[in-house]
Amino acid sequence: MYKFHLTPLIAKKLISKVDSIIKKLDAEKVTVQGHTDSVGSTDINKKLSKNRASAVAKYLLSLAGGYKITYVGYGESHPIASNETAQGRKIGDMIKGAPPPFIIGI
């Protein structure tokens, strides 16, 4: 397993690449989904996931892609990987779906 530290600069570059993909797919709607593992309280995880999704949505909006952006924070309620193992809990980023809407899960 590789260890990867996501710095703000790397995050912006990745989100910019996602923006390019969204534009190539000519998506009209984009939903950014925030996810967390099950470590910590449900309330804190919900807030954290919403804050993460909001930050990504705001950066996408700053890129003026011309598509409608919404975001939602699911916390631990919609895991994108198993919360039963440390490896599963580390999986926090993914991009899925074809438009409409284009969905980004973080």
Image (cartoon, rainbow, N blue to C red):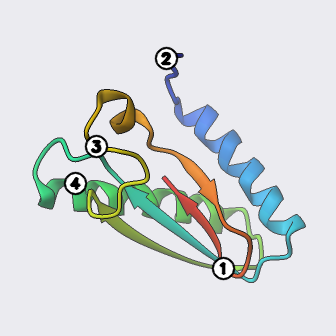
**Sequence order check: which comes first, mark 3 or mark 1?**
3
Residue visible at 67% across and 67% down?
97
**To which residue does mark 3 refer?**
83
Residue visible at 53% across and 66% down?
32
**To which residue does mark 4 refer?**
45
Q: Amino acid at mark 4?
A: Asn
List x then y, in percent, for residue 106. Answer: 48, 52
Q: CA distance from mark 4 to mark 2?
A: 22 Å
Q: Which quadrant of the figure has residue 89?
A: top left
**To which residue does mark 1 refer?**
101
Q: Is residue 105 above or below residue 65?
A: above
Front residue of 62 and 55: 55
List x then y, in percent, for residue 54. Answer: 44, 64
Left/right placement of residue 59 relative to residue 74 reads right
List x then y, in percent, for residue 31. Answer: 56, 73
For the image shown, how many numbered marks are present on the structure? 4
* Furthest-left residue in this view: 41
Q: Amino acid at mark 1?
A: Pro
The mark found on residue 3 in the picture is 2
Q: CA distance from mark 1 to mark 2?
A: 31 Å
